[in-house]
Amino acid sequence: MGENRKLCILADDLTGALDTGVKFTVAGLKTRTVIVDDPLTLPTILDNDEINVLVLDTETRALSSSKAYEKIAETSKLVTNLGYDIIYKKIDSTLRGNIGSEIDALIDILDLDAVLLTPAFMEQGRMVVGGYELVRGIPLSQTSFSKDPHTPIAESYLPTIIASQSKYNIKHIDIETVAKGSLEIERKIIDAIKSGYKILTFDAATTQHLENIAIAYIKLRKDDFKLVASGSAGLASPLAKLLKEDKKRSLVMIIAASVNEISIRQVEKLISTTQIPYIKIDIEPLILEPTKPYPYNAYVKKIVSKLKNGVDVVIRTADNRNEVDEVLTLAAKKNMSKANLRNIILETLTNIANNILNMVPHLTKIIVTGGDTAYAFLESIKAKHVDIVDEVLPGIPLCNVKLNRGKELFLITKAGGFGDENTLINLYSYLKNK
């Protein structure tokens, strides 16, 4: 899962849970399916940090609309509290069940901007054209599903079916838009959200159409839109592949605050070799104007912008040892002790890092140089505990850090004087591919 993000699939029956979950297993993501009798038991069932994809069979298809709403509301609230920050609402590819009321529950509980929905599943002959669902070319209401003993289908027009079950406005996105690609789909989604639509249904007649929708969904989520994708195993398939690829492109942030000459050279070699951009934090204002508000937000904005565009970042406080000496000299002139200077710098760095972590929740890979910096960072993020996972290089551990709401960090800490000039390059390469 991209940067250790966790996905929860909410399915209304067992076969649907399994046929969708298998798409993520095939993509190489560790997947578990759980039948939900009582949502309150989930915290005890899910004590496994290695699960990337949780598939929940809520058994809500045959419930009343109000009971289905209540169960999905309670379940979604619990799984998000457990750290599952992506929800996929699996629906029946022939639109049986309480689709509208379950989507309403997700919109209400998760405060969503929109739900993106298409039941298309080409491998099983389901597609949506002009808003109408076709099963092997036949309108849905003219197939045997129209006579289902529990949930008969008397309509083929997708928006009408959902509108009959939901309290929210629905906008349908036509096949011409979907065929143009993800950028055009993104534009239509944003326009629809601005116009107050909460449920967006989509035409889809090819696997490429589904991939276009999935790409748009992933991109808009990275742009901080609060979205849930909803569909059959058809839409789940490209989504699984994209999330797996996202893991390979995982982001790394390096906090290089050690003033040891070895560490400074390692940072310089990393930047020159990999072309990773760096942001240098100006220390002088902390000395010259200690009572004036420091421009944290300006640094945070620059760094967050790079990370959200898929670019790794180095945060540093000095380009070379001469700059370190200049800062120390300036502090001495202002009667600021080295200890006080160190504390102010560490507080500044950790404030910036904390803001970045809050704004980029899928950033979960960090390298920190310098023992004082590592301690201050762990203290600032209120780490519950640190599990040592591996020794990457002699004396340099990889740690797993548990945070609130189930979030985890992969953290490498390196003492300032450890290693040779290629050490940071090797650590970065290791963590990037972890």
Image (cartoon, rainbow, N blue to C red):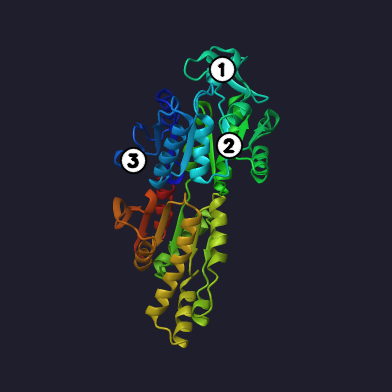
Residue at 39% x, 70% y is 260
The 10 Å Cα crowd at callout 3, few under 14, some 14 to 19, many 20 or more, is: few
Which is nearer the eye, 108 or 433?
Answer: 108
**Label 3 element class:** helix
Q: Residue 259: percent from the left, percent from the top? A: 41, 70
Query: Which quadrant does the C terminus fall into?
Result: top left
| Residue 44 higher or lower than 94, as above or below | below
In the picture of the structure, the residue carrying the numbered disc 1 is 125
Asked if residue 226 shows in the view, the reply is: yes
Q: Quadrant of residue 262?
A: bottom left
| Residue 272 higher or lower than 18, as above or below | below
Q: Pointers 1 and 2 in contact (CB under 8 A)?
A: no
In the picture of the structure, the residue carrying the numbered disc 3 is 40
Which is nearer the eye, 320 or 133?
Answer: 133
| Residue 258 higher or lower than 215, as above or below | below
Q: Which label lies toward us, 3 or 1?
A: 3
* CA distance separating discs 1 and 2: 30 Å
* CA distance separating discs 2 and 3: 27 Å
Q: Quadrant of residue 207?
A: top right
What amino acid type is highlighted by mark number 1? Answer: Gly
What amino acid type is highlighted by mark number 3? Answer: Leu
Q: Which label lies toward us, 2 or 3?
A: 2
Q: Which label lies toward us, 1 or 2?
A: 2
Asked if residue 268 shows in the view, the reply is: no
**Label 1 element class:** loop
Answer with mark 2 or mark 3, whichever residue precedes in sequence.
Answer: 3
Q: Residue 392: percent from the left, percent from the top? A: 33, 51
The 10 Å Cα crowd at callout 2, few under 14, some 14 to 19, many 20 or more, is: some
In the picture of the structure, the residue carrying the numbered disc 2 is 167
**Label 2 element class:** loop
Total residue callouts: 3
Question: In the rendered view, does 82 fall on the left or right side of 252?
Answer: left
